[in-house]
Image: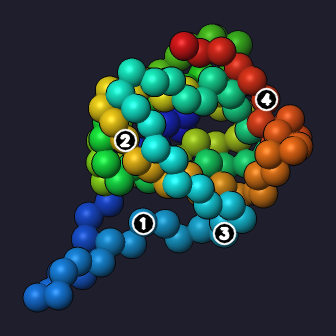
Amino acid sequence: MPLITVKKISPGIVDERGEISNVLDAEIKHVAIITSKAGSIRGNHYHPNQVQYDYLLKGKYKYLVKSIESKDGKTESAIIEAGNLVITPPMVAHAMNFLEDSVFFTFTTGLRDVDKYEHHTAKFKLI
């Protein structure tokens, strides 16, 4: 799996009532909705065993990633816009630098327990 996978989600069904966009077809165990202010930073961590999917409803951010397992130390980045779905595999450090006020959903393949944060998330400073 590549370090950054970005998919533009387009409506699958459009009629006089509106649109239906199919965002994700995966087994998910946790869903969160997150708001972020322009200029804020989120992430700076990786997940040892979970895939993370982020769907941006509103806003824009710069996404930075780096493989924890790679020896080349290369950091990749992409600009994420509303309607994009970002897929981050396990063992890939990631961080978000919000360029605009933003709202996004995070879907993960594992549970997220705030009392056991270190069981599913490891800190890793990218920005």
Residue at left 23%, top 77%?
A: 19
Judging depth in this view, the residue of 90 and 97 nearest the camera is 97
Q: Which mark is residue 6?
A: none
Where is mark 4, residue-wise? 122
Q: From the viewer's perspective, is residue 14 above or below residue 123?
A: below
Q: Give the foreground label among 4 and 3.
A: 4
Type of amino acid under label 2: Ser
Residue at left 64%, top 43%?
A: 89
Q: For the residue labelled by badge 4, is the local secondary structure a helix, a strand or a loop? A: strand
Type of amino acid under label 1: Val
Type of amino acid under label 4: Ala
Of the image marks 2 and 3, the number of the one nearer the N terminus: 3
Type of amino acid under label 3: Glu
Q: Residue furthest left?
A: 16
Judging depth in this view, the residue of 47 and 111 nearest the camera is 111
Q: Which mark is residue 27?
A: 3
Residues at marks 4 and 1 touching, judged by CB atoms closer than 8 Å: no
